[in-house]
């Protein structure tokens, strides 16, 4: 206890041997001495503002300038916050109302006279957790170095000691892995992704936060870049790790949320995390797929609005007019992360999320609007949360307005719970998009109110929204302005109809010798109608003793479909 007694009795801390080893400022040493003396009175927890008052005699505004010393001691891990959060990375003003105490690390220094770093024994890793503890210790040292660089203490003894400890534990990890013959799931999982050293550090830093949940700010992009960067040049060069096309994000190993920090400048800050499905694969690799499915099933069963779809449709396999397909391909390019980032730099886009779009597919029924939305989802590698808009209508006045808000609230809840950004598909959204009544009865007023709420929610929506509608002459102009992409779906021409017949006709069926696909293609029907007609004819032919398809079977069904079809659609006033 000699070092402890010398420290608390010292009248000249600048010459105290223990203080020199601590490599802290004189004011910081005074705070540590005050807390160390208090141990004799069985006190080890003080309100920060009281410590500053007792040690420096500063009160009120004058006390604020001493908070930087408290922050420094937290980063050196000589003191700790007495709260549920053990983070040393706090906002200065948060410290005013915080209780602090000496850390176990500093108490060991008081007892031994110097800081000690205990390397693990060089023995084979017994399991993944044993290995991860070493990686987490390495990340912890790197976080300390990042802080020391931030406050320009690279030439201090503490920085040199931490750097030495970091090199030692890295060497120790390599030695332990070399003699470990047991399969470590975490390494087997990461191997196919060929991550470089910096990417691995970022992944383990976020995994550490998922495991300990001790420092939310460690998830922020600036903190993560500082972790793997020694100077400003390396900070710039390491930014690629957090790009949409980086190995970590492209493969779904990490994901991020964005927040606008300034209400005036629109400064965007990214906060990263490891998605639930990746954590599940690491914890229970054999059961991960099943468990993830159970999680999604459980989330979807808890609501009755949406269907979750993981589309497999390919845009190249859908028969559409060249003009429509070119527009869709341009849309996909415009939703690319590099384009979005460029638009942010130019000040054209200020959305908090990386990619957002409000899209309307309009045109005749059966022209491929819904299936194209599925193909768009597949191209963007996002699932679809699909809503049949007829579900929103309610026979009770006032319920529809509530249900409109419920659509968007439930969408946010589902995407948060399953940790997937999904496209919101409002299928057959005619009731939302039609022109509002100027005068009318209570029902008209209810619809107007519902549509007003819908307009408000679209305005605030952050993500990709696709609405499909068959209405071509009754779209409210207010809705038209909210959609930044408007794509028309027209009836297919004869060549497109021929391609559709070829694709949809049963491949393994028998056809009469007089079967003529050109004849069938001459009828002006949509792809949706062709699909229904083929299905109806197939059911009929399947019941025959001699199941052979003939032209007459199809022509009869076509005439039946056309006689029951509703015509009279007009063209919308959107630009094509």
Image: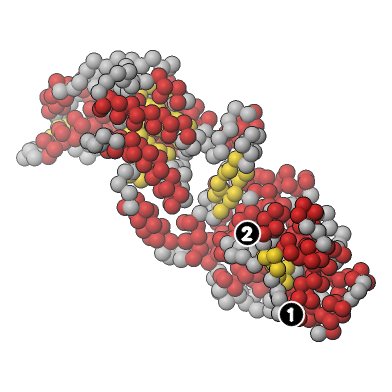
Q: Disc 1 designates what residue? A: 41
> Considering depth in this image, is 275 or 498 the residue closer to the camera?
275
Helix, strand or loop at mark 1: helix
Q: Work out which quarter of the rendered image holds the C terminus and state it.
A: top left
Residue 130's quadrant in the figure? bottom right
Q: Which colour scheme is used?
A: secondary structure
109 to 343, vertically: above or below: below
Q: Residue at x 90, y 71 (%)?
A: 13
205 to 350, vertically: above or below: below
Helix, strand or loop at mark 2: loop
Q: Disc 2 designates what residue? A: 215
> Considering depth in this image, is 530 or 71 the residue closer to the camera?
71
290 to 406, vertically: above or below: below
Q: Which residue is drawn at 25% across and 23% down?
A: 441
The answer to which of marks 1 and 2 sits earlier in the sequence is: 1
Q: Which residue is drawn at 63% across and 59% down?
A: 215
Q: Position of residue 495 (x, y in %)?
A: 31, 20
Q: Work out which quarter of the rendered image holds the N terminus and state it.
A: bottom right
Alpha carbon separation for disc pair 1 and 2: 32 Å
Other-residue count near label 1 (Cα within 10 Å), few / some / many at <14 / 14–19 / ≥20: few
Camera-side mark, 1 or 2:
1
Q: Where is residue 283 in the image (x, y as percent from the top left)?
A: 49, 65
Q: Which mark is residue 109?
A: none
> Considering depth in this image, is 436 or 196 the residue closer to the camera?
436
> Which residue is farthest bottom?
1
């Amino acid at each position: 206890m000699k070092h402890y007694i010398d420290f608390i009795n010292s009248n000249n801390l600048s010459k105290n041997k223990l203080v020199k080893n601590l490599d802290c400022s004189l004011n910081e040493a005074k705070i540590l001495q005050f807390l160390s003396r208090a141990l004799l009175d069985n006190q080890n927890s003080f309100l920060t503002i009281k410590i500053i008052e007792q040690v420096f005699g500063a009160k009120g505004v004058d006390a604020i300038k001493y908070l930087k010393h408290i922050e420094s001691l937290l980063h050196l891990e000589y003191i700790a916050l007495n709260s549920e959060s053990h983070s040393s990375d706090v906002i200065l003003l948060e410290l005013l109302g915080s209780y602090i105490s000496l850390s176990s690390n500093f108490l060991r220094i008081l007892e031994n006279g110097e800081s000690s770093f205990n390397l693990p024994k060089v023995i084979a890793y017994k399991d993944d957790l044993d290995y991860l503890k070493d990686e987490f210790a390495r990340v912890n040292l790197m976080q300390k170095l990042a802080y020391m660089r931030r406050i320009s203490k690279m030439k201090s003894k503490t920085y040199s000691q931490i750097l030495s400890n970091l090199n030692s534990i890295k060497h120790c990890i390599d030695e332990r892995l070399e003699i470990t013959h047991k399969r470590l799931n975490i390494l087997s999982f990461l191997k196919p992704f060929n991550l470089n050293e910096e990417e691995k550090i970022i992944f383990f830093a976020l995994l550490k936060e998922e495991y300990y949940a001790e420092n939310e700010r460690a998830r922020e992009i600036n903190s993560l870049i500082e972790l793997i960067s020694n100077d400003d040049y390396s900070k710039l060069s390491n930014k690629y790790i957090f790009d949409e096309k980086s190995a970590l994000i492209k493969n779904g190993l990490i994901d991020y949320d964005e927040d606008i920090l300034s209400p005036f400048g629109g400064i965007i800050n990214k906060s990263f995390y490891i998605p639930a499905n990746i954590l599940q694969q690491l914890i229970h690799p054999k059961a991960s797929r099943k468990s993830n499915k159970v999680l999604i099933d459980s989330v979807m069963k808890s609501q009755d609005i949406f269907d979750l779809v993981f589309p497999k449709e390919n845009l190249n396999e859908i028969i559409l007019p060249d003009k429509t397909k070119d527009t869709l391909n341009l849309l996909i390019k415009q939703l690319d992360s590099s384009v979005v980032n460029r638009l942010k730099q130019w000040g054209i886009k200020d959305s908090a999320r990386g990619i957002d779009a409000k899209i309307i597919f309009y045109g005749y029924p059966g022209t491929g609007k819904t299936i194209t939305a599925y193909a768009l989802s597949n191209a963007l590698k996002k699932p679809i949360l699909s809503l049949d808009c007829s579900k929103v209508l309610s026979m009770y006045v006032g319920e529809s307005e509530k249900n409109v808000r419920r659509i968007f609230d439930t969408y946010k809840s589902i995407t948060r719970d399953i940790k997937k950004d999904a496209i919101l598909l409002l299928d057959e959204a005619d009731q939302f998009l039609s022109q509002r009544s100027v005068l009318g009865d209570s029902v008209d007023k209810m619809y107007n109110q519902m549509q007003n709420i819908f307009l408000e929610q679209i305005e605030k929506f952050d993500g990709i929204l696709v609405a499909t509608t068959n209405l071509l002459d009754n779209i409210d102009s207010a809705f038209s302005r909210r959609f930044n992409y408007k794509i028309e779906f027209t009836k297919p021409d004869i060549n497109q109809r021929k391609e559709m017949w070829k694709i949809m006709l049963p491949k393994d069926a028998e056809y009469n010798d007089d079967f003529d696909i050109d004849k069938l293609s001459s009828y002006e029907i949509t792809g949706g109608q062709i699909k229904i007609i083929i299905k109806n004819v197939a059911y009929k032919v399947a019941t025959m003793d001699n199941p052979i398809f003939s032209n007459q079977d199809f022509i009869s069904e076509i005439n039946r479909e056309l006689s029951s079809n509703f015509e009279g659609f007009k063209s919308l006033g959107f630009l094509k």
